[in-house]
Each structure stands twice: as structure tokens, then as C-alpha cells.
Image (cartoon, rainbow, N blue to C red):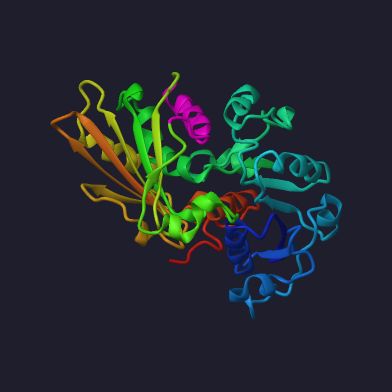
Amino acid sequence: MERVKAAIVGASGYTGQELVRRLLLHPHVELTAATSRQEEGRTLAEVYPRFAGIPGAELAFIQPDPQAIAATGATFAFLALPHGVAAEIGRALLDLGLRVIDLSADFRIHDAGVYEEFYDHAHPAPDLLAEAVYGLPEVRADDIKAARLIASPGCYPTSILLPLLPLLREKLIVPATIVANSMSGVSGAGRKADLSLLFCECNESARAYGVPKHRHLSEIEQELTIAAGEKVVISFIPHLIPVNAGIVTTTTATLADGVDPEAIGAALERAYAGEFFVRLLGKGRPADTKRVSGTNFIDIGWTHDPRTGRVILMSAEDNLGKGAGGQAIQSFNLMAGLDPTAGLQSV
């Protein structure tokens, strides 16, 4: 089988590194371009010595020029760029005939006004929003297969949406009562110089941040609203914890009147029983970041508190895997007509 040629635009960050790792080892991919303004001319193996000796790691970084990327023969491009930057390059690559999987927030929000509200600047390509497919493979596989532009979900949203969507679709919980608490490893903030992210600032410490209106709320509430068929507004409290990678989320909501608590587990089974990367732990079993670190799995457990009438959903994922690079490759596999698990089965 001929390998699919792919490019990574913005390959020197933490998510970019995860994409490099996965795509170098992907059995059906030839990595033809990796871009970085800072690392231009250096090879992948020089920047990431862990990849030395792996076929393809001799590839040198280039500038993020769309014409140069297209000239490598790439037919797919992964954008691991900051919001506001990805849209411009994404448009140029689409015009050159590439299919684009964007890991920034630029195409996740359907409403340009909502994007501006949460990201503090006008949307750079509002005409493309109607075309972009929100890339949750377990929810929109058919749309993803046919798309040329994927908006790959954020790490926090993935950990919140996958447990909640089946329950909202089946009207098992009261939407207005949803509260999500998430804890993320430091790599979720990106690979950048920031005093608040230094080792001595993060180690032996945990703190909430981005409250009460974290940017990911925009896509979370958008997707919950679609599933519920009514406007959904939730409380979301993210926390930074002193680990490199991983997200654990605990979400609670009041059970709808007359609903048997066991319907929660049944709804999750109906939604995900055939999905390889969703591991349902069952009732009373919390999720643990250690079990998903370095993988593309999301683990989901649940329980019911009869004292409060609330459902407790517990999920864990690797924020660089299922929360970013791994999930983007999962969408790529669908778009390219490959096995959805190709290049993603490491544990």
C-alpha cells in the first residue's frame, strides 16, 4: 500500500512532538514536511534525540510556507499552531488542495461572534466555519471521512464531552445542573517560557485557573447544546497539577426525574461499546491518568449518589494523545480510509 504523505505545521511544540512520534511510526504515513521557524534546518532527530535512528527522523525542519509544504507532495496537513495563526495557513493549504486537520481553536466554534467573545479577536476565516467538522471520531465518523477541514477538539472538551453526550441525547440528566472539574498536566499549557509554568512554580502545587470562563467552554457548550437540543450552560473549573501530561475530569449532574441510575451505564454502552479508544470502566470505578498516559485511550467510569440525586462521571486521557495529537491522527485515519487504530495502538 502506498504511504499517505503528510505534513506537520508547528512541529516543535509538545503536541507537535506527539504528532511526530506517532506519524514516524505510522505504518501508512510518510512524513514529508515538519515546520518550525526556530528550528529551520535542523533534523527531527537533532531537535528530538529520542527519535534518532527511526526512519524519517532525518527530515529537516522548514519554514511554515504553504507553497513549500505542498511542494513536498503532502496531501494532508496537521496544524499544531496557536489560535489566530492556524486559520491563515489552513486556508492557504486548502486552496492548494491539501486536506487539513487543525488542532488549534480556530475552526472549532461555529459562530464567529462566540469565537471573538472567548478569544478576544475577530475570527480570521469566518467563511470556513460552516465547512469545518468538529473532529470527535466517536461522534462524527461519517462526517470526518468526507471532510477536507477538521477542527480537532481541545483536551478538556474531549474529557468532558464523551461522557456527557450520550446522557444528554437520551435526556437522562438535567443540563442546567452540569458542573465539570478537570485537572491537567503542565504540558497542556504548551511549550513556552512562562514564569507560572516553571518547575518550582508548579511542583508540589495545584491551582485552579481560567475561571469562571475558560476558553474551552465555548466549544464544550456548543457541543452539549447540539446533543441536548436546547441551550446548555455549565460550570467548568480547570486545575493545573504537577504532572507532565494527563487530564482527569469529574463531572456531576442531577439525574432527570424518573430515570433509573442504571440507565447511565446502559447509555454509555450503547454509545461506545464498539469504540476501540473508549474504555468503559463501569459503575464505581474511577479513571486514572496513569493508565492512559502515552496512549490514545479515554477511560470513563461513573457512579450515582442517592443522597444528592447526582450522577458522577469520571474520565481520564492523555492531553497530548486523545486530547490532541492522537485524536487528530484518529480523524486522519478515517479521512484516508485507513483502520481508525492505525499508528495509535501503543499502551
Q: Is residue 127 left or right of residue 263?
A: right
Say whether residue 345 is visible: yes
Position of residue 18 measured from the top left corner of the image (x, y, whole percent)? 57, 61
Q: Is residue 296 magenta?
A: no
Nearest the viewer among 259 and 292 is: 292
Position of residue 19 measured from the top left corner of the image (x, y, whole percent)? 61, 59
Q: Main secondary structure of the magenta part?
A: helix
Against 252, residue 283 (above or below) is below
In which quadrant will I find the C terminus? bottom left
* Identity of the residue drawn at 45% across and 19% down: 231
Against 57, residue 290 (above or below) is above
* Identity of the residue drawn at 13% across and 31% down: 307
In which quadrant will I find the N terminus? bottom right
Residue 265 sits in quarter: top left
Mark count: 0
Tell which residue pokes out farthest to the bottom in this image. Answer: 53
Q: Is residue 91 left or right of residue 221?
A: right
Position of residue 274 measured from the top left corner of the image (x, y, whole percent)? 40, 49
User: What segment is highlighted magenta in the picture?
Assistant: 212-229
Against 302, residue 307 (above or below) is above
Position of residue 55 measured from the top left corner of the image (x, y, whole percent)? 67, 76
